[in-house]
Image: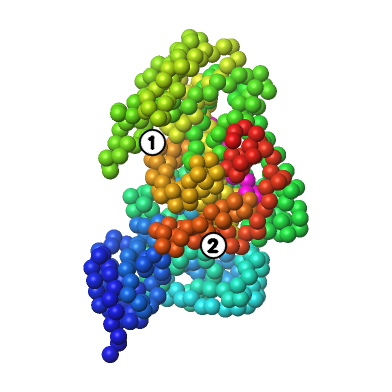
Amino acid sequence: MFEEIEISIEKKKKQISRGTTLLQLSKEYQKKFRFPILLARVNNTYRELDYQISTPCEIEFLDLNSRPGNRTHIAGLTFLLLVAVKELYGENANIIVQHSLDKGIYIETTFPISETLTKSIAKKMVSLVEKDLAITKINIERICAIRYFESIKDYAKANIMKYNTNTFITLYRIGNYYNYFYQYMPTSTGLLKDFKLTYLNDNGFVLQFPTVYSGNKITEYKHHPHMFQVFKECKEWTKLMRIENVADLNRVVSEGKIDDLIRMDETLQSNRLLNVARKIVEKKKEKKIILLAGPSSSGKTTTTTKLCMYLKSFGLNPKMISMDDYFVERTETPLNKKGEPDYESFDAVDHTLMNEQIQKLLNHEEVIAPVYNFIAGEKEFVKHIKLEENDILLIEGIHALNPKVLDNIPAKSKFKIYLSALTELNIDYHNRFSTTDNRLLRRIIRDNRTRGYNVEETLKVWPNVRWGEEKNIFPYQDEADVTINTALIYELGVLKTYVEPLLYSVDEDSIYYEEAKRLLNLFRLILPIPSEAIPSDSILREFIGGSCYHS
């Protein structure tokens, strides 16, 4: 007779046998979930479903409708896709996980691809799902892991593991295929039925899956040409620099050449912005308004300031307006579904007033523009503005690319800019460093430095920030005339130096402990980079401090 222990699920007590796995237990609760259960939170720690329950605890099951469950689903799909490719096209065939694209991930193959081949891969994945193959964990010595990845010519993984000081490494296995992932894994391929492959070009396709931002369904793929082209240009530059993954960046640090890389990357970043300024100047007779938007921590403040400086060097005089200054009075702020003020709503801005004043400015009339008093929650009309011959308006705000903004003004008069920190480096071929995590880390550092926020306070508001971006910013990125990538190839090593101590401050009993631990794990194999060589006008200075433009 097995010893029984008491657990709690959905706030209800239950007796189970000691040693029962989460997978066994999950089958009793699966019918309450829309998607397969992938993961569980045991007390305050995420556990894979092969975990054996040995002590009394509280358990919460998670499917891909949760963020940790979704990451588990994506990691499992990546491994499933890799196995399908190798079984179809041989062990030398490989995939390279590149970057997010629409509600999916763009993936390239190491061999020419076609729509027919893409369908064949998808069909093979479905067959592996139907076989419900076990995804198991094995612990092997780190040196053996390095030799294994070298033997299969996965040098990116072999090289990055040289920076791991652990004696043993945990690998995942499907059949005869082994791999290393930085996320939790499902226990079998049968849990990975929710996916779609969309052919894109002869280099690759998009792996799609349900997300919380797509209504938990797979939406029709929508191509974003500007974003895709920016990513492509960045990847081409990393190849030129021979820095295509974190191990390559570590090599530069180890060889003492990081200062040169910083100078080259900062020069490239400045040249990109200078070229944007030239485009605006070339069209200065018709383009009278610059509209600029981007998600949180994309470096809008520094980029806007530098752009103004470049425009002035060409003889233009930018006058800046923030859409935040046109907020409606706080008592009129629309409410979200929870009944809370929704400051990111389109209707939180007094568009009627803004339209009227911008139109008057274009007619060379003087206006008294508002400056929003965030303490009192009301507009104060104190800013006198009039556009002279060489003046140009620069308007920044989360809704700036929405076509409904200034819809009374002809499109030919507007120049739209989209900013985002599109991370250029992945950890290896199959593990990516997401752009969202890059921005979150920037924000954690800045919030702590400028607002005194601890990590938990930033992590608490981050989901709402993300929802606002998905609703108000990302849908309009294709409206931009130009997209600027504000990520820097070297910045992960710098962010590590600043953010690691902050992440370690999160206690184990905090509900944000697992998220802090996940972010720490991403940095485990990245060498720290000192900030001394970073120029004072760098976008990164906006977050780590020392900027010549702001405190």
**Picture colour scheme:** rainbow
The answer to which image quadrant residue 230 occupies is: top right
Q: Residue drawn 67% across and 38% down?
A: 536
Q: Residue drawn 58% across and 11% down?
A: 389
If the image is split into quadrants, where does the C terminus sit?
A: top right
Q: Is residue 312 left or right of residue 109?
A: right
Name the amino acid type tagged 2.
Asn
Mark 1 packing: few (<14 Cα in 10 Å), some, or many (20+)? many
* Viewer can see residue 280: yes
Q: Report x, y in % for residue 171.
A: 53, 73
Q: Is 117 one of the magenta-colored residues?
A: no
SS at circle 1: loop
SS at circle 2: helix
- The stretch in magenta equals 481-491
Considering only vertical position in the picture, is 53 above or below 388?
below
Q: Is 486 one of the magenta-colored residues?
A: yes
Q: Residue drawn 35% across and 63% down?
A: 62
Quickly name the residue at label 2: 521
The answer to which image quadrant residue 31 occupies is: bottom left
Q: Nearer the viewer, residue 271 or 13?
A: 13
Label 1 – label 2 distance at C-alpha: 32 Å
Q: Nearer the viewer, residue 298 or 324?
A: 324
Find residue 373 and name its label: none
Q: Report x, y in % for residue 81.
A: 48, 64
State if disc 2 and disc 1 touch (CB < 8 Å).
no
Q: Is residue 542 left or right of residue 374?
A: right
Q: Report x, y in % for residue 550.
A: 59, 33
Name the amino acid type tagged 1.
Glu
First reached walking from the N terminus: tag 1 or tag 2: 1
Q: Residue drawn 48% across and 10% down?
A: 366
Q: How many marks?
A: 2
Quickly name the residue at label 1: 344
